[in-house]
Amino acid sequence: MYDHYSFEEATAYQIQLARQLKFHPVQKIETIAGADISFNKNSSTMYAGMVILSYPDMILKSFALETYETNFPYKPGFLGFKEVPALLKVWELISSKPDVVVLDGNGTLHPRRMGVASHFGILANQATIGCAKSLLYGENHVPENRKLSSTEINSHGETLGFALRTKINSAPVFVSAGYLITADQSLEIIKKCTGNYRIPEPTRMAHNMVNDFRTGKLKAGFHEVQAPLTLF
């Protein structure tokens, strides 16, 4: 999908996409998805997964898994070009769409406001949140060392997202709106998705699921969960 893009062309495309960004509160949230990618080093195969959970009780309802071939390189600021095509293939497998999707990466917390969550959100026309494990962009103020404390992340006076302490004595995660949701609502949702681990449940479960998919423990396709499932 993007393998023929140069970084200059990718930058121009991000600027074009950013003009389409819209943010407003999601009125009703009953289901939330987590999305993640796994891959083997030096391989062109992307293993993509999406888990769908009830909200806010975080019960796994279904999941979808798919592969995608790409040679677009990993480079900070261009994650969407590597991962979004694979995530869109997974998205096509899900007939009943979740209300919000949380992606392992950034939304507007990005030099051109076009992290993987914003990129995917626009193409899927879906409310999305970025929840990244490391800070890509912006001025970080470290939150207090207590669970669910947060601080704003700014750039030139503009609030782009938040650093959120999900676990005492652990590094924060970095939360930002992707598309069709507000920054403040994104933060509140991620707080409610936080359990006993540093990584919030939607992306933590997705991470575990795609690793099992990559190692052959799970098969591609859409899978309904018939009873509450505790795998993680």
Image (cartoon, helix red, strand yellow):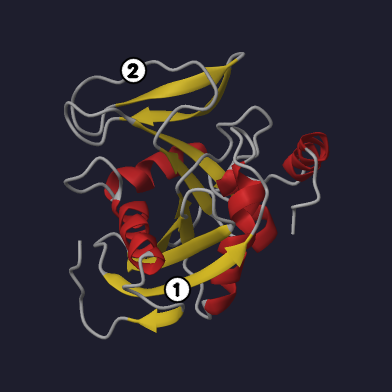
Residue under the point 46% across and 77% down:
220
Q: In the rendered view, tell whether residue 152 sits above or below residue 53.
A: above
> 67 left or right of 60?
right
Residue under the point 31% across and 53% down:
204
Mark 2 surroundings within 10 Å by alpha-carbon count, few (fewer than 14), some (14 through 19), many (20 or more): some
Question: Which amino acid type corresponds to the residue marked 1 in the rendered image?
Answer: Ala
> 194 left or right of 106?
left
Q: Which residue is mark 1?
A: 64
Coordinates of residue 97 in the picture (x, y in percent): 51, 72
Residue under the point 37% across and 48% down:
189
Residue 9's image quarter? top right
Q: How many marks?
A: 2
> 116 left or right of 60?
right
Earlier in the chain: of badge 2 and badge 1, it is 1
Residue under the point 48% across and 57% down:
101
Q: In the rendered view, tell whether residue 180 sits above or below residue 111.
A: below
Coordinates of residue 183 in the picture (x, y in percent): 50, 38
Q: Which residue is mark 2?
A: 142
> Which is nearer the eye, 209 or 98?
209
Residue 215's image quarter? bottom left
